């Protein structure tokens, strides 16, 4: 099956014709790439995040490759994956050719899942900024806050109830992504100190984007996060949406 995906992407690039990555809705076996390269702040929770996603894959019948090698972003290699996960990436981590390959991958129906500082990545690449939804701007100290569930029907939030209280590092974003994305969770700024976005503080969202799918969660700074059961369910469903194996309203 993956040889077929590879052939389709190579044909797209060589011949300049349009195409789509085949749907794997009826195939429980798929593969994701976890990319955790950093060119700025490096989270010590990255190994915990990789281990969590590997566990999720083992328990839910998908394969996981983890890499910090930017050369992975080429047409032939990306064709192996139903989704690419940016796990606490930071800074400028792809060159122009790698950016172009990633953009083609999304345009052909690939998926993206961003965790925490995926929004503190490639600040000068507008296409990526729109893919992730918003850029990180600032954060207060780590503290407990209350998250409000805006979409209780999405697979990545449906099990949370109306509120989710947890401890993490809470990002303020440079812009509010609402209007461009489908907001899943918002942060109640009255329950912690240091929020700057007011009464509408999106925290997780999804969207269809230029032929592909994108899902982002701000949660994910601390090592402890990656052992939380609810968080695991949250990320699992986000990965499955990005991979195109579950459906969700992300319009």
Image (cartoon, grey):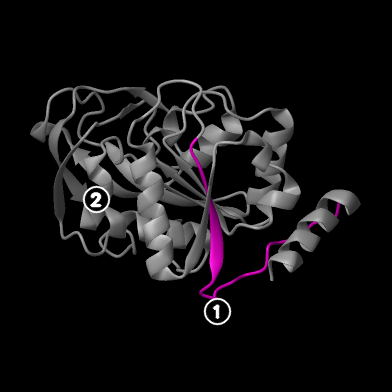
- Residue sitting at the far right: 15
Residue shown at 56% from the left, 24% from the top: 92
- The x and y percentages for residue 194 are 18, 22
Mark 1–mark 2 distance (CA, rounded to whole Å): 30 Å
Between disc 1 and disc 2, the foreground one is: 2
- Which numbered circle lies on residue 227? 2
Query: Label 1 neighbourhood size at 10 Å, few (<14), some (14-19), many (20+)?
Result: few
Residue shown at 42% from the left, 51% from the top: 206
Does residue 1 lie above or below 157 as drawn? below
Residue shown at 90% from the left, 53% from the top: 15
Q: Earlier in the sequence, mark 1 or mark 2?
A: 1
- Which numbered circle lies on residue 176? none
Compared across the picture, whether 141 is left or right of 106 comes to left
User: Across the whole image, how many numbered discs are drawn on residues?
Assistant: 2
Which one is in front, 43 or 96? 43
Please say whether residue 25 is one of the residues in the magenta stretch.
yes
Residue carrying label 1: 26
On-image quarter of the N terminus: bottom right
Q: Give the range drawn in magenta.
A: 16-36
Please say whether residue 6 is one of the residues in the magenta stretch.
no
């Amino acid at each position: 099956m993956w040889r077929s995906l590879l052939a389709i992407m190579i044909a797209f690039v060589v011949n300049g014709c349009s195409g789509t990555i085949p749907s794997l809705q009826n195939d429980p076996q798929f593969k994701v790439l976890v990319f955790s390269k950093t060119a700025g702040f490096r989270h010590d929770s990255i190994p915990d995040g990789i281990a969590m996603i590997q566990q999720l894959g083992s328990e839910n019948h998908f394969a996981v490759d983890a890499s910090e090698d930017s050369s992975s972003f080429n047409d032939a290699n990306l064709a192996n994956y139903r989704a690419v996960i940016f796990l606490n990436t930071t800074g400028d981590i792809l060159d122009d050719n790698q950016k172009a390959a990633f953009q083609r991958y999304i345009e052909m129906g690939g998926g993206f899942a961003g965790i925490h500082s995926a929004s503190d990545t490639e600040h000068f690449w507008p296409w990526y900024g729109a893919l992730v939804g918003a850029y990180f701007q600032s954060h207060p100290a780590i503290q407990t806050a209350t998250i409000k569930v805006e979409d209780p029907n999405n697979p990545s939030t449906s099990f949370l109830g109306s509120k989710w209280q947890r401890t993490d590092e809470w990002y303020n974003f440079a812009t509010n992504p609402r209007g461009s994305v489908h907001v899943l969770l918002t942060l109640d700024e009255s329950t912690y100190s240091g929020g700057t976005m007011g009464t509408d503080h999106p925290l997780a969202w999804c969207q269809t984007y230029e032929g592909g799918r994108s899902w982002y969660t701000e949660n994910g700074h601390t090592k402890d996060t990656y052992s939380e059961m609810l968080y695991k369910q949250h990320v699992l469903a986000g990965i499955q949406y990005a991979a195109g194996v579950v459906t969700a309203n992300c319009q």
